Image (tube, rainbow, N blue to C red):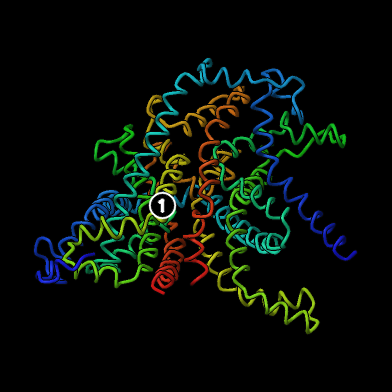
Amino acid sequence: MSVTTLGSAPAYAPGRSRPGGRAYWGALMLAPYLLVFLGLVLYPVAYGLYLGLDTQSYRKLFQDPIFYRTAVNTILFLTIAVNLKLAIALALSGFFVVDRAWVRVLLVLFILPWAVPSIPTILSFRVMLNPENGMINQQLFRLFGIFDGPPWLTDPRLAFASAIMVHIWKSLPFWTLILVTGRLAIAKDLYEAASVDGASRWQQFRHITWPSLANLYLTSTILSMIWTLGDFNSVYLLTGGGPADQTQVLATLGIRYMRNNSLDLGIASIIVAMPLVLPLVFVMVKRLSKGGEA
Amino acid sequence: MIRRLDEAKLILIALPVMLWTLLPIYHLFVLSISPQDAVLAGDLWPARPTLQNFALVFGQKHYYLTNFWRQLANSFVIAVATGVLTLVVATCAAFAISRLRVRAGRTIMNMALATYLIPAAFLAIPMYKGMGNYGLLNTRTALVLAMIALASPYAIWVLKQASDKLPRELDEAAMMDGATPLQLFRLVYLPLMKPSLVAIGIYALLLAWNEYLYAFLLLSSEREVPLAVGLGLFLGADDAPWNLLMATGLIYAVPPAAIYYVFRKHMVSGITAGAVKS
């Protein structure tokens, strides 16, 4: 930057909306995103809410037994998948921070489920878990002589459990990585001092690791709840919501209604989910925007 | 001795974890090299491994594969368009909010964050109706627009955080020299933001390449859909050629996985930075 322009007047005064000014350029550069937001988010959502004003569709929705099954499934899916996944991730993050070269190599392999697109891998699960000729049941028979392997995808309960399993398989690496990052941020000398004082592994976890990770763990739980609520692929591609619509969740039910030409029910099922979704989103926006301002 | 014992314990943890992680991917690979008559055998390794399936896929020699190259090209075009356009939209917005400090910048950031957090599966039906009203259904444009709408909120958030870290003095010095905001953007901001821009471009590109739900809702003709939906079409029949599906799936999965690994260091940093801090 040269000094030749030193004598010239300031190119723009802050806060003025005249051409070439700061506010003018600010508005201009924000315009593309505002257009995207208004045209592709706000307008569709407002239109959806307008379609959702018809009280008749809620009456129909609440009369549909599949909706009840789906509501219960969604709660079960959230409770089991989120807590199981994060508990395992917390434990595994303890394994992956161990300072060994081969552990670092394993971590690279461990994130494969997250790195690989989910469509081929979920379809691989689907074929692998086929009760008659999938690899799992065939091998159960050959290795252990189990003639009738579990009906992984044809029994409603097992199919639902399998969908949870696939969901955890896919997202476990991500949360493990997050908690690994959290653990690595803890000062090493805390542990050194503790082991000098003769603290056991459990005491170190209880008094050093957990207090440092608790807030991150809570953020992860909320974020994971939101993402798990929206997991369409694990259920749709593995079970298709079947058998007999017994494994639908809210993320797949709306699409099912829409495909059956009951758009009103689809919209209603989404609006009914909002009292669950919006508080989580609200809490998370507050947490994230606070983090961003720091 | 104690170290040996520790090592044994670690291996005891590592084995089941790796089995769990790799089994479905291994199964995908095994089926992709299995001949048609071995598909239903459930073997751990095919008796006669073959690359024939890949030849069939590349030659489009099956009913489900008639549009393979076309769908692969669709995936590519949609992903690249989403990556580039998201980058343009998000970089401009982040610059306006973080450096030019537009009014209501904070409100817009929070709106974007809320859009990012509301599960995409719940926005799908309104988006479908909206695209219908715009007359864009069954065009790749519709999918690209939808993906920009889904990708840009996170992109803006990450870029704004990165941009907040650049020293204010830089802008002031440039202004003193008489730089316009546009010059500041082009000559100072963009070069400094390069690493974050690469990461965000890759993020949007992968998001679009991997998307299934929006692709199958917004596009219906087999010549317009990306390969992700092409894979789903195999589910239409019970006696589907799973080996061909897995071979196609492998071809579809390798490019994004490779890109992810190359840029891995940048990919998680955004979300962890936000999450760890709060």
Horizontal side of A70 relative to B114 (left or right) equals right
List x then y, in percent, for residue B160: 35, 63
Where B113 sits versus A70, above or below? Answer: below
Residue B271 in the image: state x and y as whole percent: 48, 60
Q: Position of residue A106 (x, y in %)?
A: 69, 51
Q: Quadrant of residue B175?
A: bottom left
Q: Dividing the picture into quarters, in which one does residue A124 lie?
A: top right
Q: Give the quadrant of the N terminus of chain B.
A: bottom right
* Towards the viewer: A240 or B66: B66
> Residue A68 or B214: which is nearer the viewer?
B214
B220 over B61 or under it: above or below: below
Amino acid type assigned to the residue bearing label 1 in the image: Ile
> At which x and y percent is residue A122?
59, 39
Q: Residue at x 30, y 66 (%)?
A: B98
Report the label total.
Answer: 1
In the image, residue A21 sits, relative to residue A207, either above or below, namely: above
- Out of A104 and A84, give the one closest to the viewer: A104
For label 1, the residue is: B200
Mark 1 belongs to chain: B
Image position of A232 (left or right of A286): right
Please tell me how crowded label 1 is: few (under 14), some (14-19), or many (20+) other residues with Cα within 10 Å.
Answer: many
Q: Is residue A100 left or right of residue A178?
A: right
Q: Which residue is rendered at x = 67% and y = 39% of the image?
A: B24
* Rendered position, B40 above or below B98: above
Residue A107 seen anywhere in this rendered image of the structure: yes
